[in-house]
Every structure is written in C-alpha cells, then in structure tokens.
Image (cartoon, rainbow, N blue to C red):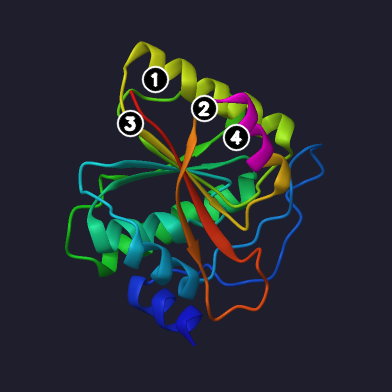
Amino acid sequence: MKEYYYDKLLNIHTNGKRVANNHIKHYYPYEPTPYQALEVLFDQYEVKSTDQFIDFGCGLGRLNFFIHYHFHARVTGIEMNEAFYKRALDNLENYRKKIKIPTDKVEFAYCLAEDYEIKKGDNRFYFFNPFSVHIFQRTINSILLSVEADPREVDIILYYPSKEYIFYLENQTNFQLEQEIELLYEKNPNERFLIYRLKY
C-alpha cells in the first residue's frame, strides 16, 4: 500500500520487481528499498537539509525523491544502467511538475560507482548491495581519499547489509558502527539498516 501511496504522492514510478542490471560483472540486480523501511530509517536517523546523500545503484531514484521531499537535502543518484538512468530523469521531470519546492538538489549521474568523483560536501552514502565487495572497497576508498582532502564526518548507510560489506568496514577501515535500525515488522534479521560513521 505504501508503495502506491508514495509513488503517487511524489508523482514518480519506482515500483517493480528485480531487474537485471545489464550483464556487467560485479553489479547486482536492481531492487528498490521498500518505502516502509525508509519510513523506519528516517524516523530514527537524523537528516539535515545541509547533508549531501549519494545513493549508489539508485535505480529509478526512489531514495532521492523520498529524502528531498521530506528533508530538502541534496541527493545524487549514481546509476550505471542507462535505461534506469533515463527513467530516473523522467521521474525527476514528473516530480518537478508536482512538487512546489526547488528541485535543484536532486541529481542523477550515469556512471559506474567507482568512477564517481566524490565531492567535498558529500557526507552520507547509501548502499543496498548494488555490487560486489570488490567494487564496494574501491568506492569506500574513494570516499576515504575525499575525507583526507576535506576532513568531515561521513556516514555509510547499509540496507540488508552483506557480511562482506560489514567485514570490510569493521576490519579494514576506521568506520565504526554508530547505529543499528531493525525493521521489527520483518521476521528476516537481515532486514535492517546499519550506519557506520567515520569521525575526524
């Protein structure tokens, strides 16, 4: 029910089952984060309008529009599938027609995650298992290099976190687990959010 409600509210189309993300090795099928899960996450996780979110493997842009609508924060969706990217741009155009607030903080980039150049203001990074741990490591390394150049607090937000992602963050980086948000309506213990924070 929430899937229909929010898509209609935001004037976008993000529903659909898992779709293969081309045939590129290390990249996984697209699946949007359920709106109900997003409600739980952002009920417990603070977002400021000055935050800059990066959604790796954004698909059709659901997270982007949800965050912008509720918090007016900047959100950039990174998508390597051209068809998804174009549909995200269509959603942005439809969102602009419906929403009365400026939408210049909603952006999409058509590129591989490891090729995205982290901006100095980017401080919140969202992952719903979009690719293998090898790509994840390269992406996290880009984030760490950016923080070295421009020190700031950054968060990694994992939904349905893979054991490989968790192991890498906890054993090979200085990120520390800051918050765990469980989805109590789900019986699957993997249905949760983990927020890792790098402090400076």
Question: On the rendered image, what quadrant is the C terminus found in?
Answer: top left
Q: CA distance from mark 3 to mark 4?
A: 17 Å
Of label 3 and label 2, which has the lower sequence position?
2
Count of labels in the image: 4
Between 35 and 104, the one lying in front of the other is 35
Dot label at residue 147: 1
* Camera sees residue 87: yes
Of label 4 and label 1, which has the lower sequence position?
1
Q: Name the residue tied to disc 2.
A: 116
What residue sits 65% from the left and 47% below the top? 130
Q: CA distance from mark 4 to mark 1?
A: 18 Å
Q: Name the residue tied to disc 3.
A: 153
Of label 2 and label 4, which has the lower sequence position?
2
Per the image, label 3 sits on a secondary structure element best described as loop
Q: CA distance from mark 3 to mark 1?
A: 8 Å
Q: CA distance from mark 3 to mark 2?
A: 19 Å
What residue sits 50% from the left and 79% below the top? 3
Determine the main secondary structure of the stretch shown in magenta.
Answer: helix
Q: Residue 196 appears at what percent x and percent y? A: 47, 41
Q: Nearer the viewer, mark 2 or mark 1?
A: 1
* Camera sees residue 112: no
Amino acid of disc 3: Glu
Looking at the image, the residue that sits furthest to the bottom is 1
Check disc 4: other Cα within 10 Å, few if <14, some if 14-19, many if 20+. Answer: few
Q: Nearer the viewer, mark 2 or mark 4?
A: 4
Q: Name the residue tied to disc 4.
A: 170
Of label 3 and label 4, which has the lower sequence position?
3
Dot label at residue 16: none
Amino acid of disc 2: Tyr
Q: Which residues are magenta?
A: 166-174
